[in-house]
Amino acid sequence: MSLIEIRETIEQPSVSTDASGFAIVQKQINLPANMLHAIQKVDFFQDSLPGYEGASPMYVELIVTPYPVIYSNMDFSTPLLYGSRGPMAGSDTVLFKTIVGPYEAAPPFTNPPFRQFPNQSVGATPTFSFYTPMVYITALIHGQPTTPVVNLAFSVYMALESTKANLTSYGLGVIRERSVAQGITLMNQGRVITPARNVGQVFPMWRYGGIRPERMLTSTAQRNFWLNHSTQDGEAMQSTANLRTYIKGARTMAGFDQAFGVDDVAKGNIPDWIRFGLNRGLVAGPILPQMPPVRYADNGNTICL
């Protein structure tokens, strides 16, 4: 186990944004291979006030990752300006991220606010671990299209605790981190709940109370029922159509405030427990005609010859 301290800077006298108002400045730092690296401390400092003459404010995303940042198809603000933001700070392969801005073009120049993840108190304690033997410091610049940004300078401090890793764990860890880095360019997570449907979306069901009701078969509708054991007992004859009706009804989804199962005009209430413990002959599908003749076991299952 060893402690590695990294003090690195990103400095550019001039960099111009492209036609979309986007620019990337990146630096790579090599680390020992076959090791598990754990972030102990991380800090960020702005060394200068960049010069910028764009009509719209400029923002800088400063990201520390164990891989080259793949900018996404998601927008930093709007698709016409400030597009192609970096990966989410909550991504489990992002070690540190801060957003600095807005930088206003008109003087007097002042230190703009910045927001970072993890925050300053959490960033001074052990946080994330990774296997990739490299660290990348990337600055994603969002501003006016085709506008130069001068005097760009940032400093980053990191303290890593490196431990010898098993080769299998190391290989799988590197593959996973690279896969996550390259696979997510558009994120869509979380479900949308309209206010009218918010009631009953959480447990316990505070509006309805008690337990959910359950539909039960009546003796006049089913008389007897098939079981997955006691195959020598007599049962009422059921047609294929009837069996499919019962099983389909039991597998029908019900509303969160409704009884399990489904109503059927001819069969009555069909409970959800019918789908459990079904004889294999009921769920295996039709048996195709074949030669030699099909042989059956005592429980009705087909014997493989």
Image (spheres, grey):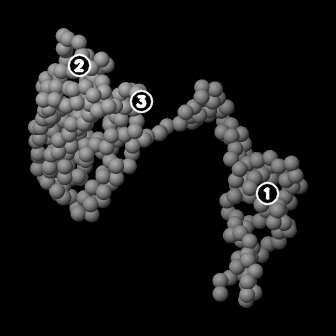
Crowding around mark 2 (Cα neighbors within 10 Å: few <14, some 14 to 19, many 20+) is some
Q: Which mark is residue 84?
A: none
- 296 and 222: which one is in front? 296
Task: Judge by depth and name the residue closer to the eye, 244 or 59.
Answer: 59
Which callout, 2 or 3, points to the residue nearer the camera?
2
User: Is 147 situated left or right of 194 in this image?
Assistant: left
Tag 1: amino acid = Thr
Residue 25 appears in which quarter of the rendering? Answer: top left
User: Mark 2 is on which residue type?
Assistant: Glu
Residue annotated with mark 3: 79
- The x, y position of residue 43, in whole percent, is 17, 32
- Position of residue 219 relative to residue 284, above or below, is above
Which residue position is annotated with label 1?
Answer: 245
Picture coordinates of residue 159 (x, y %)? 14, 40
Q: Residue at x 64, y 26 (%)?
A: 196
Q: Quadrant of residue 94?
A: top left
Please report the residue visible at 27 percent of the width from the left and 55 percent of the height from the top.
Answer: 174
Query: Local crowd at mark 3 within 10 Å, few (<14), some, or many (≥20)?
Result: few
Residue farthest to the top, as pictured: 108
Residue 142 appears anywhere in the view: no
Read off the residue under disc 2: 53
- State the residue at coordinates (68%, 82%): 303
Q: Position of residue 92 (x, y in %)?
A: 33, 44
- Label 1 neighbourhood size at 10 Å, few (<14), some (14-19), many (20+)? some
- Mark found first going from the N terminus, 2 or 1: 2
Residue type of the residue flagged with mark 3: Pro
Q: Earlier in the sequence, mark 2 or mark 3?
A: 2
Whichever of callouts 1 and 3 sits on the residue coming sooner in the sequence is 3
Left or right: 303 as drawn, with respect to 232: left
**Foreground mark, 2 or 1?**
2
The Cα atoms of the two marked residues, 2 and 1, are separated by: 72 Å
Secondary element type, mark 2: loop
